[in-house]
Structure formats: C-alpha cells, structure tokens
Amino acid sequence: QVQLVESGGGLVQAGGSLRLSCAVSGGSFSNYAMGWFRQTPGKEREIVAGIIWRGSSTYFANSVKGRFTISRDNAKNTVYLQMNSLMPEDTAVYYCAAEVRGTAIVRGDYWGQGTQVTVSS
C-alpha cells in the first residue's frame, strides 16, 4: 500500500519561506511523478508544482513561478517543495500526489493527507 506523508507546513509571515516534505512508502518512488497541489475552502484543488518520474522536467503554476521550487531525492523517497517569498494568497492546505510514470503535470494516483500552510500579512 502506497502512503504519502506531508510535513513542514505551518504559520509564516508574508515574505517568509517554508519547505514542505513528502515521504513516500510502500511503492517504487523512482517510478512516480510527484506533484504538489493546494486547496482553499470553496475552491477546487489546483496543481502548484510537479516533477516528472524520470529526469528533471518540472512544472509550476504561473502563480508560483520564480518563488517555488520542487525537487526529489530518490534515495530518501522524498519530494520537497521550497516556497519562498510567500504571500497571503498562498494560504491553503497543501497536498502531495504521486502518479505512476507520469509527466510533470501530475494527475495523482496516490495522495497524502495534506498539510496546512498559513501566510499572515
């Protein structure tokens, strides 16, 4: 059974940084494209960033380009989302997702439980 566990969320002031981590167990991490999504109440979940299963191709939503980076450590079965220059509109529950041999625009075969990120103004 594949499990994804996010960590690193919290409260930060505008302009600050956070790094989210997502540890994957129970599957073959190197075969997964990995993505980060976010959702706020009343809105659909949206993809924030993704990284392809093989290689280094990445995807970023326009709203986070230049501020967020995504990386993966296949030795640790972990994907990271480095978030810099955070803004109040980045406040959301952030979810990690995995897609078997997917592209950087991850659709999500498996999901984590989410971690709250709150950016105060």
Image (tube, rainbow, N blue to C red):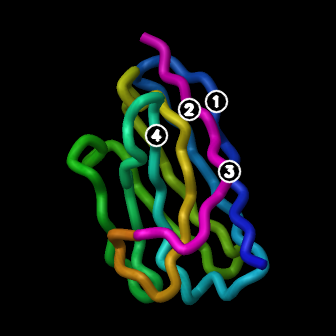
Q: Write down the residue under mark 3.
A: 113
Q: Which of marks 1 and 3 is nearer the N terminus?
A: 1
Q: Looking at the rendering, which quadrant does residue 64 occupy?
A: top left
State whether residue 22 is above or below residue 24.
Answer: above
Q: Alpha-carbon neighbours of circle 2 within 10 Å: few (<14), some, or many (≥20)?
A: many
Foreground mark, 1 or 3, reads 3
Q: Which amino acid is tagged 1?
A: Gly
Q: What stretch is highlighted in magenta?
A: 107-121
Q: Where is residue 42 in the image (x, y as percent from the top left)?
A: 41, 30
How far, Cα to Cα, is label 2 from label 4? 10 Å
Disc 3 is placed on an element classified as loop
Q: Which amino acid is tagged 2?
A: Val
Q: Do the residues labelled 4 and 3 touch (CB within 8 Å)?
A: no
How far, Cα to Cα, is label 1 from label 3? 15 Å
Which residue corresponds to the image point at 54% horizontal and 81% vertical from the top-left?
A: 32
Of the 4 image quadrants, the one containing the N terminus is bottom right
Q: Write down the residue under mark 1.
A: 10
Q: Which amino acid is tagged 4?
A: Gln
Does the magenta run of residues contain 31?
A: no
Q: Write down the residue under mark 4.
A: 39
State whether residue 80 is above or below residue 28.
Answer: above
Foreground mark, 3 or 2, reads 3
Q: Are marks 2 and 4 in contact (CB under 8 Å)?
A: no
Q: Are marks 3 and 2 in contact (CB under 8 Å)?
A: no
Q: Earlier in the sequence, mark 2 or mark 4?
A: 4
Q: Write down the residue under mark 2.
A: 117
Q: Are marks 1 and 2 in contact (CB under 8 Å)?
A: yes
